Amino acid sequence: MAMRYLYLFSAALLLVIAALTSAQGQPMTSEFTIGRLKYSGGGDWYNDPSCVPNMLRYLSEQTSIRTAKDEVRVSLLDDNLFSYPFLFMTGHGRISLSDREAERLSVYLTNGGFLYTDDDYGMDSYFRQEMLKVFPNKEMVQVPFSHAIFHAHFDFPNGLAKIHEHDGGPPMAFAYFHDGRMVVFYSANTNISDGWADPDVHGDPPDVREKALQTGVNIIVYALTQ
């Protein structure tokens, strides 16, 4: 377990050092990518394939973080899970984690990893239910607008932007914490990652897509530097 923690910590530290080195005009030696989490249960974990490449490109344009061109698709039981400090989960509908998968996600998160989950409508109750397996003794709490994740790179004084009006009411942001560190960030009733997709996929206007991409930058920058 200590070796897994060291692997995650080293991966995140290397990315931060690379960004600082780039800011000084020297070449970087590592690329950041997002691990898209594969899960069973019937939900479409793979939806909007253009969203992560677009997010990675925007991140590289707006920060000094050097990024890969595409996501890596990874399951919780893959040997290389601990190579990726940032996981992304989305989809519509049911999520199912086996006891072994839930335990592996708990180990990943409590040893340096970070999970961003975006409800693409229909997964909320399933996500909450499965996270009870991962953290039976923790509570998912609402994130206040004053939290640093909303101000990590771009300023969002009112929290998450509303990207899609699937359901009424405001966007909601929740999180799990471990030893004072945010390990899971969950966006609900907004569908941030749909705003990362190619313009013709959902027809979002440019200003809405910009807000969604800026939010993604904040989440990633915060996750790598908290």
Image: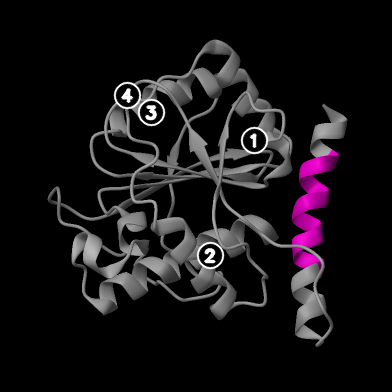
Mark 1 and 4 residues: CB-CB less than 8 Å, in contact? no
SS at circle 4: loop
Q: CA distance from mark 4 to mark 2?
A: 27 Å
Which region is colored magenta? Answer: 6-17
Instruction: Locate residue 155, reporting x and y percent.
Output: 45, 76
Q: Is residue 97 left or right of residue 199?
A: right
Earlier in the chain: of badge 1 and badge 4, it is: 4
Earlier in the chain: of badge 3 and badge 2, it is: 2
For mark 3, what is the residue?
Answer: 128
Amino acid type assigned to the residue bearing label 1 in the image:
Leu
Earlier in the chain: of badge 2 and badge 1, it is: 2
| Farthest-out residue, bottom | 25
Residue 40, quarter of the rendered image: top left
Q: Is residue 172 magenta?
A: no
Say which of marks 3 and 2 sits in front. Answer: 2
Earlier in the chain: of badge 1 and badge 3, it is: 1
For mark 2, what is the residue?
Answer: 56
SS at circle 3: helix
Instruction: Locate residue 217, reporting x and y percent.
Output: 51, 67
Instruction: Locate residue 18, reporting x and y percent.
Output: 79, 69
Q: CA distance from mark 4 to mark 3?
A: 16 Å
* Classed neighbour count for the residue bearing mark 2: other residues with Cα under 10 Å, few (<14), some (14–19), many (≥20): many
Earlier in the chain: of badge 4 and badge 3, it is: 4
SS at circle 2: helix
Q: Which mark is residue 42?
A: 4
Residue 128, quarter of the rendered image: top left
Q: CA distance from mark 1 to mark 4?
A: 24 Å
Q: Nearer the viewer, residue 181 or 107?
A: 107
Q: Nearer the viewer, residue 159 or 100?
A: 100
Q: Is residue 188 left or right of residue 17?
A: left
Instruction: Locate residue 188, reporting x and y percent.
Output: 31, 46
